[in-house]
Amino acid sequence: MVARIEGALASWYAPGARWATAPGSGFALGPFVLEEPIGQGAMGAVWSARHTTQHVRVAIKVLHPPSASSDAEEFLAAFRTEVRAVAGLDHPNVVQVLDHGTVPSGGPPGSGLAEGMPWLAMELVDGGTLSARRGRMAWPELRAVVLGLLDALAHAHARGVVHRDLKP
């Protein structure tokens, strides 16, 4: 499931791409209000959102469930299990899971939001990719990044969470 969640991040729009008025902006998911889409992938879409009372910006991933209704229940059960597992991770190199749920009703036309689609709210990390931010990295910098990544993976593995979709 972690692979499915991370798969939603596999295909990002260009850094800084913004929409003036995106279908779905202003739609509420739990205590969050969607602002704008920031990424799209085969598994779903990623939106920036804001908590309605805490005014904290977050990233919300909305996943496309399987089309067969028999698979949908299994998918949602696996999604909830994995969210609980990932939410238990507390590491500086792991984005914190804040909340999750399902879309309560269909979103505005063209938004891609449909009733029952699972969503996951997590810390919003702005900035794009390492290569876009830093260009080619010197070995000492690269080593520090890789060691931080490996430390995060070891933390997850020690708690029974396996990533399964790490990309260079």
Image: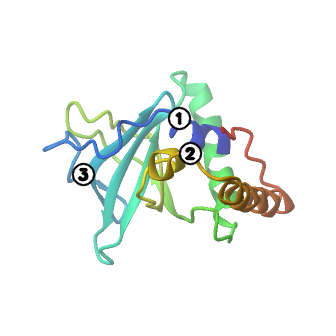
| Residue found farthest to the bottom | 54
Placement of 6 over or under 29, stated as above or below: above
Q: CA distance from mark 2 to mark 1?
A: 21 Å
- At x 70% / y 53%, what residue is drawn? 139
Q: Position of residue 166 (x, y in %)?
A: 69, 41
Q: Which mark is residue 27?
A: 3
Under circle 2, the secondary element is: loop
107, 168: nearer the viewer: 168
Task: Rate crowding at label 3 as few (under 14), some (14 to 19) or many (20 or more) other CA atoms within 10 Å.
Answer: some
Mark 3 residue type:
Phe
Nearer-N-terminus badge (3/1): 1
- At x 61% / y 46%, what residue is drawn? 79
Quadrant location of the C terminus?
top right
> Which residue is identified by label 1?
10
> Which residue is identified by label 2?
136
Q: CA distance from mark 2 to mark 3?
A: 39 Å
Task: Rate crowding at label 2 as few (under 14), some (14 to 19) or many (20 or more) other CA atoms within 10 Å.
Answer: few
Under circle 3, the secondary element is: loop
- At x 29% / y 46%, what residue is drawn? 16
Mark 1 residue type:
Ala
